[in-house]
Amino acid sequence: MRRAYKFRLHPNATQARCLAVSLETHRRVYNDALAARKEAYESRQETLRSPEQYPVFAERRNAQIADEKAGGSSPHWLAHISAVSLRDTIRRLDRAFDNFFRRVREGGKPGYPRFRGRDRYDSIPFDNYGASGRLVDQDGVTVHATETKNGDGAVVAVNRSEIVTAAQRMRGRLQDGAVVALVDRYNWFVYGFMTDDAPLRGYRLKVFGVGAVRIRIHRPIRGRIKTVTVKREADKWYAVFSCDLGDVTVPESTLPAAGIDVGIVRFLTTSDGRHEPNPAYLKAELPEVRRLSRKMAVQNRQKRPKRRQFPTLGGKRRRKMKKKLQRLHERIRNLRKEHHHKVALRLVRAYGFIAAESLNIKGMSGNRRLARAILDASWGGFLTTLKCKAESAGTRVVEVDAKYTSQICSRCGHCESENRLTQARFVCRKCGLALNADVNAAKNVLTRGLQQARTELAGANPHRGVAREVSNAVSNGTGTHPPSARERPGKSAAKTVGKHSTSRKQQGKSADSNDLCC
């Protein structure tokens, strides 16, 4: 199992400038590698990959290092970045082309890799932890170093005087199995696992060409660190550690099952009647976003100098306004993520089986009236967070088809568009069931989720014996009654349901803004 940990970096002014220069150098390496691939294919019909391109950039880097040592005056940008991050940047371009060819084979939008502008490249990868980026404690001891045979060069070692005190001090901070390894006569390193009561202060991240940057470790790191990525968000810097937890066995949860129905008016509704309000953080901050956007747009309309060929994009004032706007969007994004984590944690602590709708969010956001509200709710990001937390808690999450879930009666199975009277009211025209529309949809989602789970588990025909199993689940209090005689909607309903949306006139009056998939 892999898990990522994200921590805030606090560089000083010199380190922040070095990080920005290093990020810009990696961006130019990426663009130069892309330009070389385009030129090779257009002129010679030759396809280049990282094994052919990395030696070229490595030779340039070595030449700049030698020239800098000799006192040369030419720029030495490549000399101040790591060979590991240089290689990983070119490999990132490999993954971009792999995804491009995959989309071509699948018949989707190709999306050819494009050159990255200054605002479209924001991270420096170090796929070999310990070589150019490593986490050290207050005594300079590398934490969670990668285990290698004979300690052969994978970890930047510390000296002998530090390791003597470190071995005594870390004896109570690391779990059983912590190792003090000898690299040579004078160099040692320590690796192991943090305990819950380990002190979290005094850590620094050593980055090639930057130095030891203060890092705020707010929780212990589990597993063995494999990679580290330095990332810039707005005007802040972060470090993301990818850790290998090994083979983790999580006991299966015995909590009851539930279905969830996401929406706009209410963020989430469960099959047992619980509602989660939609905070709509972007809507609350929209006046300030518009104000800052207008002020930045004014800076773009500066007069062009007569002797310049291209218009300027503003100066210091525009950059300051842009940073303010970036910080505001970052705050909205962080609030939204915090809400997702809290709601997902409550769900996995209350339920052992969760059924959710499989939504075409990209297609639904094509509705101009509801696009902003849909993207502000960020259903896709919430489902991703829910799956990650469910995996660690032993909870199973399944996604089911969302068709007709807001029109089918959860008691008798009658399907008709007139069952949904308003956004919040559902009344079955056959059996007379009166229920909250979102709760009814969540019960239908749960029923389909139980059917899908039992079919996958038994490997049987989904049309045989499933209704009996779901009925047993109902009697145990874990599900709802399946539709016994599901009817296809009529002609009028087919026009409304088949295209997953209604006409613009109907949207303003009776469209379902809380369940757009029906």
Image (spheres, helix red, strand yellow):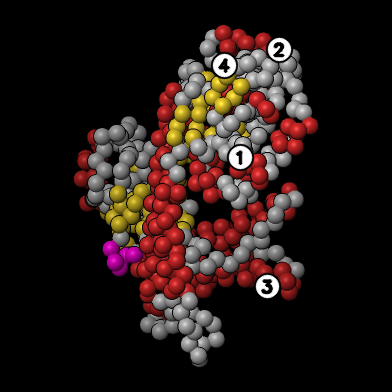
Q: Can you tell which mark lies on residue 214? A: none
Q: Position of residue 477 (x, y in %)?
A: 53, 12
* The stretch drawn in magenta includes residue 27: no
Majority secondary structure of magenta residues: helix
Tag 3's secondary structure? Answer: helix
Seen at 30% across and 57% down, the residue is 10
Residue 148 vs residue 288, the one in the foreground: 288
State the separation of the CA atoms marked 2 and 1.
42 Å
Which tag is nearer the camera, tag 2 or tag 4?
Answer: 4
Above or below: residue 310 compared with residue 331: below
Above or below: residue 499 compared with residue 126: above
Residue type (three-letter) at the residue carrying disc 1: Lys
Residue 398 vs residue 14, the one in the foreground: 398
Q: Can you tell which mark lies on residue 509? A: 1
Point out the stretch of residues depicted in magenta: 12-16
User: Label 2 crowding class (10 Å Cα cut-off): few <14, some 14-19, many 20+?
Assistant: few
Q: Tell whether label 3 touches label 2 (CB within 8 Å).
A: no
Residue type (three-letter) at the residue carrying disc 3: Glu
User: Label 4 crowding class (10 Å Cα cut-off): few <14, some 14-19, many 20+?
Assistant: many
Q: Can you tell which mark lies on residue 479? A: 4
User: Label 3 crowding class (10 Å Cα cut-off): few <14, some 14-19, many 20+?
Assistant: some
**Upstream in the sequence, badge 4 or badge 3?**
3
Above or below: residue 444 compared with residue 306: above
State the separation of the CA atoms marked 4 and 3.
60 Å
Residue type (three-letter) at the residue carrying disc 4: Gly
